[in-house]
Image: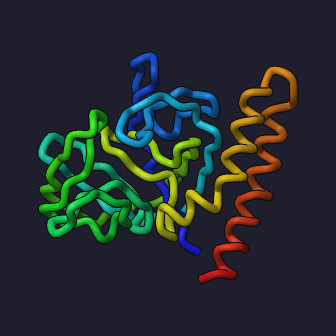
Amino acid sequence: KSQGCFASNTTVRLANGDLKQMSDLHVGDLVFVKKENEIITSPVLAIFRHYRSSIHFVDIYTTNSIIPLRLTPLHSLLVLSKHDKHERYIFAKDVSVGNHVFSSDLRPLAVVNVKETLISDDSGYAILTFEGNIIANDIVASCYATYDHSTMHMITTPMRWWFLILFQLRQLIAFDYLQHLTSNIIVSFVDFYLQSIY
């Protein structure tokens, strides 16, 4: 089973203007996400960390980036392909030079280089927001991987609502314990369901 992740040093801008690396994010941090045709803030609902002895990444460079967006090959991001009229989420491995990704103000950014990288002894991070996406390294990226974005967003609906309710009740309950416990249960269910339909 492939895990879809961001590199640990991927940066995310918080609502207060601070920049954080993925490895330093916490549940409840307010991050920027895309909702329909606007950018809003939304809390991080869950964080999944995957340690690997080696991780294969795809580095995506745009016209205004020195540091690439680094994703595992089956992680999705929002892309306008050369021959498409509308943007859609595609896997990082399918992004090519000449495609456009989208910035934190929803401007299209031309992809100027795509490289494969192998990183040893590191962790990848998957972040869950209610909207199913996050602005990472100033680019709109999906929270999902392995299967297409729309399928994952539909299947994780109960999971996202559950985490949102837990987050809103965090002052009244043992939030960290329940969040950790239900993360493992729900992710196992999603994996089982996906394997049964594909």
Front-most of 128 and 160?
Answer: 160
Q: Position of residue 4 (x, y in %)?
A: 50, 62
Q: Residue at x 82, y 48 (%)?
A: 181
In the picture, measured across the screen, residue 123 lies left or right of residue 99, that is right
Q: Is residue 164 above or below residue 186?
A: above
Q: Position of residue 151 (x, y in %)?
A: 54, 66
Residue 171 in sight here: yes
Q: Residue at x 43, y 68 (%)?
A: 74
Front-most of 118 and 178?
Answer: 178
Q: Is residue 18 above or below residue 62?
A: above
Instruction: Locate residue 119: give its quadrant.
Output: bottom left
Q: Position of residue 79 (x, y in %)?
A: 28, 57
Q: Is residue 168 above or below residue 71?
A: above
Front-most of 195 and 93?
Answer: 195
Q: Position of residue 10 (x, y in %)?
A: 40, 42
In the picture, measured across the screen, residue 137 lies left or right of residue 5, that is left
